[in-house]
Image (cartoon, grey):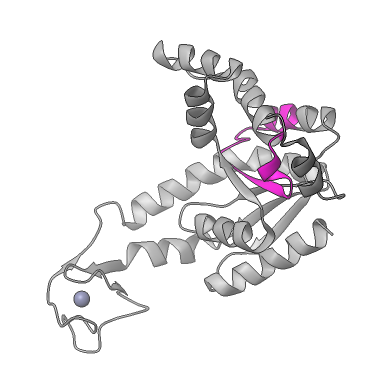
Amino acid sequence: MSGMTTATVAARPATRPAVLILLGPPGAGKGTQARMLEERFGLVQLSTGDLLRAAVAQGTEAGRAAKAVMEAGGLVSDEIVLAILRDRMAAPDVARGVILDGFPRTDVQAAALDDLLCEAGQEVTAAIALVVDDEAMIARVAGRYTCAGCGEGYHDSFKVPARAGVCDRCGGTAFRRRADDTAETAGARLAAYHAQTAPLIAYYEGRGVLQRIDAMGTIDEIGADLADIVSRVSA
Ligand SMILES: [Zn+2]
């Protein structure tokens, strides 16, 4: 690290790094939107899995603790995850800010995260909830299928081939449906998401940092709304 100090200080902007938490159900395009925020705002998405793997590989103190727990078949404690997160957030490449992915999952973890950020003179800039219409989401998922030849996506209601049973793109006649793309499994996934996320949403609403975005629009529309919020809160 010696010799890098000057560059590190110069690269760190005067403003505090943005700490964003994206909350959205499966199928709401969270991954795509997080990548857009990375590119547009220079943020870095930190997923719990990647953080753990990197810390273990680097052999940091918290990484060694995580490795021992995982090798014993246990679940890595919040304390260890927070220690790894704290180490990671001190690195110069995240000076612009982070998008946390997969953490916090509970209001207890959210409170612990607030404490950790507070110690570093930071705070959660915004928790952004991608809000979907459950019935419409289920209908989207349940009717979708793809061409077995070229992978073109179709939908029973919203996008049927011009000639029934023939792919518009490659002329193929074989199509695939994922076994779990049914109304039942889509509904169960959404219910699990709501059950898990409700306490977090309430927590961040109480902290005054919750922002809601209508996530039923196109990828570009959702992206524009998200970018507006991030521009506003990180200004
Ligand atoms: Zn095709």
Q: Is residue 153 above or below residue 81?
A: below
Identified at 70% across, 41% down, the residue is 92
User: Horizontal and vertical percent for residue 71?
Assistant: 40, 14
Q: Is residue 57 left or right of residue 131?
A: left
Quadrant of the rendered image containing residue 120: top right
Identified at 58% across, 41% down, the residue is 46
Q: Is residue 42 above or below residue 111?
A: below
Q: Is residue 117 magenta?
A: no
Q: Would residue 67 be visible to someone looking at this image?
A: yes
Q: Residue furthest front?
A: 3
User: Horizontal and vertical percent for residue 112?
Assistant: 73, 26
Q: Is residue 101 magenta?
A: yes
Identified at 61% across, 49% down, the residue is 23
Q: What is the quadrant of the C terminus in the image?
A: bottom right
Q: Is residue 221 left or right of residue 170?
A: right
Q: Would residue 201 be visible to someone looking at this image?
A: no
Quadrant of the rendered image containing residue 161: bottom left
Q: What is the quadrant of the N terminus in the image?
A: top right
Q: Is residue 53 above or below residue 190?
A: above
User: Horizontal and vertical percent for residue 67?
Assistant: 47, 17
Q: Taking the image as four quarters, which one is ligand 1 found in? A: bottom left
Identified at 52% across, 24% down, the residue is 58
User: Horizontal and vertical percent for residue 154?
Assistant: 30, 74
Q: Which residues are magenta?
A: 90-113
